[in-house]
Image (cartoon, grey):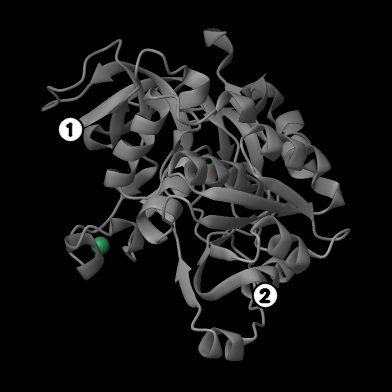
């Protein structure tokens, strides 16, 4: 079969190559891929600045498709089942984090698309416990967005303490920011989304998806806008989704005293922060990293009840052979989310 692979370490070394059809082993399932989403991680792997990648490996960790073969010991799944897949491929199962329902923090965690072969291919083999059934009304394209949706669900529903009727600030209107926005709305919160002039299109989409307000931080004074929008109440929770140093500064400046900041974006370097503010205003700083199996159940329920609009985030679909154009658009920030699909599925 054909697969988009990172063939060796370093910048580049990504190509569509022929690999043997994978066979499902014990407790494993093979999925015929319908489509898989391109994520920032794939771009980092392409550029050679994602340290955990283990080439040669097939990229792609946001996958939806149809079960087409099952290995020994698999009884819950049958060929024809429509599924999406947890991106977590391996954890140790023994460490403190694994034993306490926080396998996302396991030091041995490996995910599809960099540690184990991913979904930019005709087929993928995964552990049976990684599968989640797609409700009938959820399309494969929406299903491929379940992984980024779980990132947002984990941050909002499992890490933050945002309550219905409270205000949230979301910095960075990329795919994750726009999903955090929707999960905040589904939880009854009110959202203010920030970006820069470069993000004008994405901020317009944030408006459509239910933001109470959007702010271009390079054109407007964010603190005074928040003061006005929230009628002096301020935001209870800030979700930093951009990985840009100025944005965490905005979060700290604008969150109400006693409020919280949930860090989701990655900076790739150390940044400076006015920690005196954290102390004197009793700000709670929290990290949010990927998802657990429990998160997936919540995300699927949100998809099933149509509480989130995932279709609005899909900017285009490309056959795997034209991955370079899809990567280029993702890199340029044109649109939101691009999906790749195997040629013979169209
Ligand atoms: Zn991703
Ligand atoms: Zn572990």
Dots 2, 1 in contact, CB < 8 A: no
Local secondary structure at mark 2? helix
Task: Return the x and y of residue 293 as percentages of the image width and height.
Answer: 28, 45
User: Is residue 30 positioned above or below 27 on the image?
Assistant: above
* Residue at screen point 82% across, 43% down: 200
Task: Return the x and y of residue 50 as percentages of the image width and height.
Answer: 58, 58
* Residue at screen point 46% across, 48% down: 151
Tell which residue pokes out farthest to the front in this image.
231
Res. 290 in view:
no
For the residues marked 2 and 1, what is the alpha-carbon distance in whole angstroms?
Answer: 50 Å
* Residue at screen point 47% across, 16% down: 139
Of 197 and 220, the residue lying toward us: 220
Local secondary structure at mark 1? loop
User: Is residue 181 positioned above or below 251 on the image?
Assistant: above
Of 333 and 226, the residue lying toward us: 226
- Say which residue label 1 marks: 27
Q: Dot 2: few (<14), some (14–19), or many (≥20) neighbours within 10 Å? A: some
Q: Quadrant of residue 37?
A: top right
* Residue at screen point 48% across, 42% down: 183
User: Is residue 66 positioned above or below 257 on the image?
Assistant: above
């Amino acid at each position: 079969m054909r697969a988009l692979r990172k063939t060796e370490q370093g910048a580049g070394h990504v190509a569509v190559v022929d690999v043997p059809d994978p066979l499902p082993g014990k407790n494993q399932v093979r999925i015929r891929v319908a489509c898989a989403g391109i994520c920032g991680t794939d771009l980092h792997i392409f550029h050679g600045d994602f340290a955990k990648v283990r080439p040669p490996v097939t990229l792609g960790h946001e996958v939806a498709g149809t079960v087409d073969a099952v290995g020994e010991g698999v009884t819950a799944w049958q060929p024809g089942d429509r599924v999406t897949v947890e991106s977590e491929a391996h954890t140790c199962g023994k460490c403190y984090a694994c034993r306490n329902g926080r396998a996302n923090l396991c030091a041995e965690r490996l995910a599809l698309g960099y540690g184990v072969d991913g979904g930019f291919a005709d087929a993928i083999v995964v552990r049976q416990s990684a599968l989640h059934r797609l409700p009938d009304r959820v399309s494969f394209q929406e299903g491929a967005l379940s992984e980024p949706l779980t990132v947002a669900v984990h941050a909002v529903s499992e890490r933050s303490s945002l309550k219905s009727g409270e205000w949230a600030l979301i910095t960075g209107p990329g795919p994750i920011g726009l999903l955090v926005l929707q999960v905040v709305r589904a939880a009854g919160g009110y959202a203010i989304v920030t970006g820069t002039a470069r993000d004008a299109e994405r901020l317009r989409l944030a408006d459509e998806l239910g933001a109470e307000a959007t702010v271009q931080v390079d054109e407007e004074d964010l603190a005074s806008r928040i003061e006005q929008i929230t009628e002096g109440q301020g935001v209870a929770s800030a979700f930093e989704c951009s990985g840009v140093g100025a944005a965490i500064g905005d979060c700290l400046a604008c969150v109400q005293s006693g409020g919280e900041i949930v860090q989701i974006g990655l900076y790739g370097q150390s940044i400076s922060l006015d920690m005196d503010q954290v102390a004197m205003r009793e700000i709670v700083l929290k990290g949010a990293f990927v998802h657990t199996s429990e998160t997936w159940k919540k995300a699927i329920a949100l998809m099933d009840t149509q509480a989130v609009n995932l279709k609005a985030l899909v900017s285009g679909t490309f056959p795997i052979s034209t991955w370079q154009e899809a990567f280029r658009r993702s890199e340029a920030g044109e649109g939101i989310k691009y999906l790749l699909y195997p040629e013979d599925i169209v």
